[in-house]
Amino acid sequence: MNQRIARLQSMMAADGVEGLLYATSANLQYFLDDTTFPWQRTMDTGGVDGVLIDGKDISSSGASHFLNMPDLLLYVPAADEPMLFMTPQRARTMEHIQMKKRIDYFVMLPERVGEVIKGKKRIAYGESCGAYLKDRVIGETDSSIEAVPGERYGELLRRIKDPGEIQKLRRVAAFTDETMGIIVKHLKAGVSSNQIEDLIIRLGVEKSLGDIPFPPTCRYVHTGSPESEDLDGHDENAPMEEGTSVGFDYGYVMDGYCSDFGRSFYYGKNKDASDGYKALMEAQLRLLDAIKPGIPMSLCFNSLYATMSQFSQEKWLRKYGDFGLMGHQIGIDVHERPWLHTDQTAIFEPGMVMCIEPKFWRPGVGFMRVEDMVLITETGCESLTKFDRELFELG
């Protein structure tokens, strides 16, 4: 049995959890310690919270659509060998997984899992396909079983990356840097943001990558135009012209691990845009210098805001609500907890990999983003994304 599952079982036993169910998700990939099987990202396989049918919220009703009904389930008991429940089609792609398996048809999986959990008192379940696990599998097996959320077990164990995971994150970060170098060469008059986004996707396909973590964004803002007052005002099919800011947000999935990255450029020259970018990048660099193990993550917004203030640019530092959200952890999922915001009490720990992403939005001038994947080390931090920070003005 692998060490990850042994640690998981220790946590479960301490909480009085007799068993845990994970559907296809980052947690399942992590505990199988295998990146070769394909699965849809959590944003598409998660629970049905907030879904309305005929105006009725079905979050707790157990209703679900196909994406919420997985063909692969991992069951981990607190003190025994784990088991995979899967369809025959899924089994053919997972013959190499050395774990006890129960293979049956899709419609029979809840009943087969029920045979194993019946009589238990407390079963935990993951967020991915959560309504299906809680209501269809656990609830219909035995209504006396206490079903409790179990996502946090995997999240806590995934928080600190092991050397193998860090190496995979280095690789996907390096590939993302490489693609930025290719993409910049295509930023010329006449090309649309939609064409650039298609290029980002095509570069992943050409590398035979199995997935991207989210739709890529190449955001244009044409300085001084009527649509420049609206962050989403630019037509994706409109050609680039002199006086356009370009903000990127994109990533790839390589060997089961994600990248998330941003850089910004300006086609032409504009002092307001240039001054804003210099302040934003300087704020990022000063923050990276300040990050050390043991420092609270709430530092991020406060540090970025302080530097932007020194450049008289703090007014344009984009934040969300009152939380000063400035990033998140990354790994198998592109957005992993903890998030970086002013109310965050978590501290930086060696082995974490964070995405730090300050943004500049000045209506009428432009939008800019700097986002780096950052490894927390024993003494500070290391940026895994290293694309040229000086390059800004193009054309």
Image: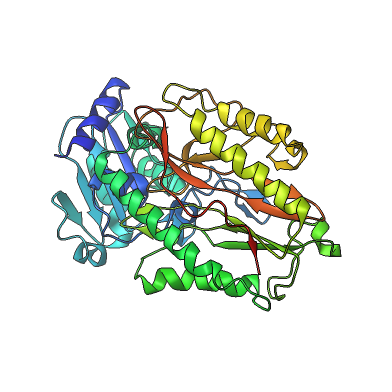
Task: Give residue 393's quadrant in the image.
Answer: bottom right
The quadrant of the image that shows the N terminus is top left
Q: Specify the color scheme.
A: rainbow
Examine the rendered structure and indicate whether residue 100 appears above or below residue 66.
Answer: above
- Residue drawn at x 45%, y 65% as measured from the top left: 179
Task: Give residue 248's quadrant in the image.
Answer: bottom right
* Nearest the eye: 144 or 300: 300
* Nearest the eye: 178 or 355: 178
Task: Give residue 281's quadrant in the image.
Answer: top right
* Nearest the eye: 109 or 286: 286
Residue 27 appears in the figure: yes
- Residue drawn at x 42%, y 62% as measured from the top left: 178
57 sits left or right of 255 in the view = right
The quadrant of the image that shows the C terminus is bottom right
Examine the rendered structure and indicate whether residue 106 appears above or below residue 335.
Answer: below
Q: Position of residue 310 (x, y in %)?
A: 71, 32
| Image label count | 0
Seen from this angle, which residue lies furthest bottom? 190
- Residue drawn at x 68%, y 71% as measured from the top left: 236
Q: Position of residue 28 (x, y in %)?
A: 31, 47
Q: Position of residue 292 (x, y in %)?
A: 44, 26
Q: Position of residue 383 (x, y in %)?
A: 44, 43
78 sits left or right of 129 in the view = left
Residue 326 appears in the figure: no
